[in-house]
Amino acid sequence: MSVTRRYRDAWEGFWREAPEEPEAVFWDAEPALTAGRHLPLLEPHLTDPGLVMIDLGCGNGTQTRFLADRFPRVVGADLSAAALDHARRADPAGQATYRLLDVVDTPEVRTLHAELGDANVYVRGVLHQAEPGDRKTMADGLATLAGERGRVLLVEPSEAAKGVLMGLAGGPAGPPPKLAPVLKHGIAPGEVADEALPGYLRAAGLEVLASGTLPLATTEYGPDGTRIELPSTWIVAGRS
C-alpha cells in the first residue's frame, strides 16, 4: 500500500514551484516558533536522546536543520523528491541526511527501521493532510519507526484550524499569497477530529504519554500585521 498518485503529484508540484527564500512557504515558520516550542514537550519523555531523530514530512528541511543542532543524528524524510532537493540545497554542510519515504508504504517503513533502529520521530502537520483511509496505516508507520525505545511527537492542526484556514481562503481578496499555492495544488486542509488523534496512536500500539494544545505558527500575517497562528493539538507517544 502507498499514497495515491494524486496526493504524491500534488506535493511534487507544490515543492517544484516553491521559492527558496526563508518563510516563503505557509507553514515554514522559523524554528524558534515551531520545533523550538515543540521539543520541550518531547524531551522529558525521551528514553534515549541518542537515538536517530526522524523529521517526518521534513519539506525543505528548516526544522530538520534545527533538530540537527540538538541531536547526534537526524534524518529528514519526505514523500516528495522535490522537497528533499530544497532541503539538501539548504544544507550544504550536510548537518542532516535526507530520505525519500512514503510512510504509508509498510515495507518501505520497515526497511528504514531495520537500517536506523528505533528512532524518535517529529511529525508536524502531516497526518491531517493524508487521505482519511491512509491515516491508520500512517500511525502504524510511526509506531514501526519508533520501535520499542523511540518516542513520537505528533503535532496536528486542531479541528478549529480548518475554519480559520477556510476563512482566510474565502476572504474578499482571496487566499493570502502564501496560502494560495497550497490550495492551487490541491493540498486542502483535512479535518481530523481532535479525539481521533490519540485513537490512531493507541490502535498502532503506542501509549499516549502527554498531550495538550498549542498555537501553531504560520508565515502569513493578518491585516493588522499579527502573525496568523492555528490552534493545534500535540501528543507525545511511545511504548511503555
Image (spheres, rainbow, N blue to C red):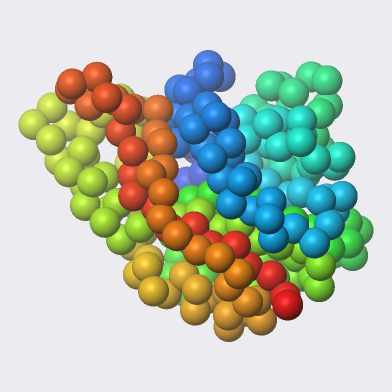
Count of numbered marks: 0
Instruction: Tell me what residue is drawn at x 62 percent, y 30 percent.
Output: 62
Depicted 57 relative to depicted 26: above or below: below
Q: Nearer the viewer, residue 115 or 69?
A: 69
Determine which quarter of the picture holds residue 240: bottom right
Quick check: 106 left or right of 94?
left
Instruction: Tell me what residue is drawn at x 21 percent, y 39 percent.
Output: 169
- Measured as percent of width and height from the top left, residue 157 is found at 39, 53
Depicted 202 relative to depicted 229: above or below: below
Q: Nearer the viewer, residue 175 or 66?
A: 66
- Measured as percent of width and height from the top left, residue 223 is found at 17, 22
Residue 153 seen by the camera: yes
Quick check: 103 left or right of 234?
right
Which quarter of the figure is the N terminus placed in? bottom right
Instruction: Tell me what residue is drawn at x 50 percent, y 63 percent.
Output: 211
Quick check: 58 left or right of 30?
right
Determine which quarter of the picture holds residue 179: top left
- Measured as percent of width and height from the top left, residue 208 is found at 58, 73
Depicted 182 relative to depicted 131: above or below: above
- Measured as percent of width and height from the top left, residue 130 is found at 48, 61
Residue 138 seen by the camera: no
Q: Residue furthest left?
A: 172
Quick check: 78 left or right of 217?
right
Depicted 107 relative to depicted 98: above or below: below
